[in-house]
Image (cartoon, rainbow, N blue to C red):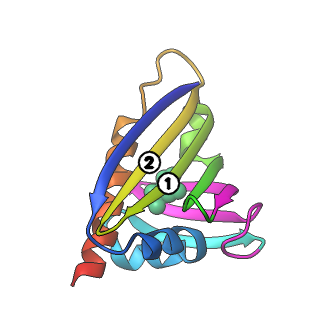
Amino acid sequence: MGKLVAQTEIKSDGDVFHEIFRHRPHHIKNMSPGNIQGCDIHEGEWGTVGSVIFWNYTHDGKEKVAKEIIEAIDEEKKSVTFKVIEGDLTKLYKTFIITVHVDTKGQNNLVTWTLEFEKLNEGVEDPNTLMDFCLAVTKDIEAHHLK
Ligand SMILES: CC[C@@H](C)C[C@@H](CC)C(C)C
């Protein structure tokens, strides 16, 4: 299993950041319209394990889709784990799991993105640009809350 981890500090509220990814990821398109164009719930309720979310996003200049199941939610640790089950990423990766975690330490809020993946073949590159995408979305969410 390949793994990429990246961290970035946000000045906006960490609890709000977690709440967005857990309960209202469909609001992200309003905060990061260049990256996220759509987010719909296909199965279950927002913010619950087992719910299925469908994303329309633009990555590496191309419009893409991702269907993800919420695999885990840890309210204590403020983390949400999304497992990709359909869409562009499944053309390159057998498994693709995205975890977003927020550490709130006083004024500082540290966001950690973890991408775990199994490539379909050796020629597939590591998802570095997707990690950049996740960090860019993070910054847009922060900026939205600092206005
Ligand atoms: C599969 C790429 C995007 C749609 C993942 C989203 C978080 C699971 C995005 C908002 C970073």
**Pick the front one: 61 or 75:** 75
Kind of residue indicated by mark 1:
Val
Q: CA distance from mark 2 to mark 1?
A: 5 Å
Can you say which quadrant of the picture contains the N terminus?
top right
Residue at (59% x, 76% y) in the render: 23
Could you tell whether 146 is left or right of 98 in the image?
left
Say the numbered circle drawn on residue 113: 2
Locate residue 70 relative to residue 136 in the image: left or right: right
Element carrying mark 1? strand
Left of 9 or right of it: where is 97? right
Q: Is the residue at mark 2 in contact range of ligand 1, meaning its CB lies under 8 Å from it?
A: yes
Q: Main secondary structure of the magenta part?
A: strand
Whether residue 118 is situated above or below residue 29 in the rendered picture: above
What kind of element bears circle 2?
Answer: strand
Q: Position of residue 129 (x, y in %)?
A: 34, 40
**Region of the chain picked out in magenta, as a range:** 45-74
Q: Is residue 68 magenta?
A: yes
The quarter of the image holding the C terminus is bottom left
Q: Write the residue at 43% across / 58% down.
A: 103
Q: Is residue 18 left or right of residue 11?
A: right
Can residue 18 be seen from the camera position used here? Answer: yes
Q: Is residue 44 magenta?
A: no
Asked whether the beta carbons under mark 2 and mark 1 sit within 8 Å of each other, the answer is yes
Q: Residue at x 55, y 35 (%)?
A: 116
The residue nearer to you, when weighing 37 against 30, is 30
Q: Residues within 10 Å of mark 2 (few under 14, many from 20)?
A: many
Residue found farthest to the top: 122
**Residue annotated with mark 1:** 100
Amino acid of disc 2: Trp
- Note whether ligand 1 is within 8 Å of mark 1: yes
Quarter-wise, where is residue 121 in the image? top right
Sequence-first disc among 2 and 1: 1
